[in-house]
Image (cartoon, rainbow, N blue to C red):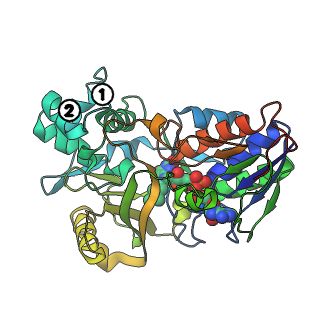
Amino acid sequence: MELTIVGGGLAGLTAAIAGAERGADVTLFESHATLGGRARSTAPPYVANDGPHVLYGDGAPYAWLRRRGLVSPSKALPLRGALGARWRYRGRVGGPPAEVLGAATRRRLRAPHDVDFGAWATERLGAATARAVANMMGVALFDADPARLSAAFVWDRFQRVTAPRRPSARYLIGGWGTWVDHLVEQARSRGVRIATRTRVDALPEGPTIVATSLDAARSLLGDDGLRGESGHTLMVDLGLTRRRGDPFLVFDSDECGYLSRYSLVDPTLAPAGEDLVQAQMPVRPGESRADVRLRLETLLDAALPAWRERSTWRREQMARGRTGALDLPGRTWRDRPAIDRGAGVYLAGDRVAAPGLLGEVALTSAVRAATLATAPGNTRSAAPTR
Ligand SMILES: Cc1cc2nc3c(=O)[nH]c(=O)nc-3n(C[C@H](O)[C@H](O)[C@H](O)COP(=O)(O)OP(=O)(O)OC[C@H]3O[C@@H](n4cnc5c(N)ncnc54)[C@H](O)[C@@H]3O)c2cc1C
């Protein structure tokens, strides 16, 4: 059978590989000149990821990829990095707040999905803990007010990020762009045909997986219902001359920001003697770019002494609707746009109905979409004309 994939980001490449593995004759179309979508990285000497940084090694998507040799070389978070994690809390940067440590021991506590995290956590853990935990989860939610989201959504992610065993975060050596190159090579070696600079403006005939952003899928499918909550954040990548004592990670229990010095794990990301840091600060409703930049730089001031004088390179990006799905109270991942759209069309991406953290949603939905699209009987000739 023939299978068409629209979009060559992580979801499209994964769907292409999964479809080829199930015997389909796969063609993938990507509108840009380069593949990878949000998983692209800048060219050396500063290899900054456009979006993602951490692949979680304890999730089902990672196991699926690893079994097939699809993960490029990666390193776990080094112990000194984990131990060197810092928090901004009540205006100071230091070790983990007692509130966060206390919450992290409540492993058996389960949160409901039908109330907001702020209300639930205030009642169960106290107002200060609710705030410290919600705000530090800006690291995975990219939202200026995580307390407004579903309690189960925030709490599950907090438990995953603070799991007591060695953190499962894995850093891809050479940046995510290197992983994209590896996926492309693997897809081609499985017979997938890839056309870049080819924008698809109308749904092709036959089984098709639409692996674009949700916004692009909305116009391609002409379905105004393809909407959902997502993050909004300002990101700054910095090259800095190295200074002993800079933290590896700073969680921000005050304002939901985050920063990480990725070159500690992978020194190839920056020139010798320098570090690569990415910081992000979620945008408040109605906030100007200048104001959020000021708040982000206040976090840098608190965490990285003399960072302005040490700066060798800087890039700034605004990410809106690009950081994956957020679930509001009363909703779970099952309430997001369904993968199966009927008539041989399937959705994959990080804002559709699939479980997981951030990019895991894109990977899981891609495998599911490929499985459905290649199910027996779902052949090109059987697909209705659109
Ligand atoms: C700041 C930030 C931090 C993040 N951190 C993490 C992290 O640490 N870990 C993690 O797992 N995830 C993280 N994510 C999320 C992760 O980046 C995404 O979930 C993932 O990259 C989404 O992949 P995708 O293939 O679904 O979408 P995309 O990467 O957006 O790919 C869609 C592709 O479709 C193409 N396209 C669109 N329209 C058309 C068309 N009409 N025809 C042809 N092609 C088209 C686009 O050009 C693009 O290449 C982060 C994201 C951001 C922005």
Q: Earlier in the sequence, mark 2 or mark 1?
A: 1
Near-viewer residue (315 or 148): 148
* The N terminus sits in image quarter: top right
Q: Cβ(mark 1) to ligand 1 < 8 Å?
A: no
- Reading the image, the residue beneath label 1 is 112
Tell me if residue 382 comes above or below residue 318 in the rendering: above
Q: Amino acid at mark 2?
A: Trp
Q: Residue at x 26, y 63 (%)?
A: 285
Q: Can you tell which mark lies on residue 120? A: 2
Asked whether, in this view, residue 74 is left or right of residue 100, the answer is right
Q: Position of residue 181 (x, y in %)?
A: 71, 58
Q: Amino acid at mark 1?
A: Pro
Q: Quadrant of residue 37?
A: bottom right
Asked whether, in this view, residue 295 is left or right of residue 7, the answer is left
The alpha-carbon separation of the residues under discs 2 and 1 comes to 8 Å
Near-viewer residue (68 or 382): 382
Q: Can you tell which mark lies on residue 286? A: none
Dots 2, 1 in contact, CB < 8 A: yes
For ligand 1, give the image quadrant.
bottom right
Q: Residue at x 41, y 29 (%)?
A: 165
Q: Residue at x 48, y 42 (%)?
A: 336
Q: Quadrant of residue 213?
A: bottom right
Asked whether, in this view, residue 240 is left or right of residue 56, the answer is left
Q: Position of residue 217 (x, y in %)?
A: 59, 57
Residue furthest to the top in view is 108
Q: Residue at x 53, y 33 (%)?
A: 59
Secondary structure beneath dot 2 equals helix
User: Could you classify mark 2 by the number of other residues whose Cα lies within 10 Å: few (under 14), some (14-19), or many (20 or more)?
Assistant: many
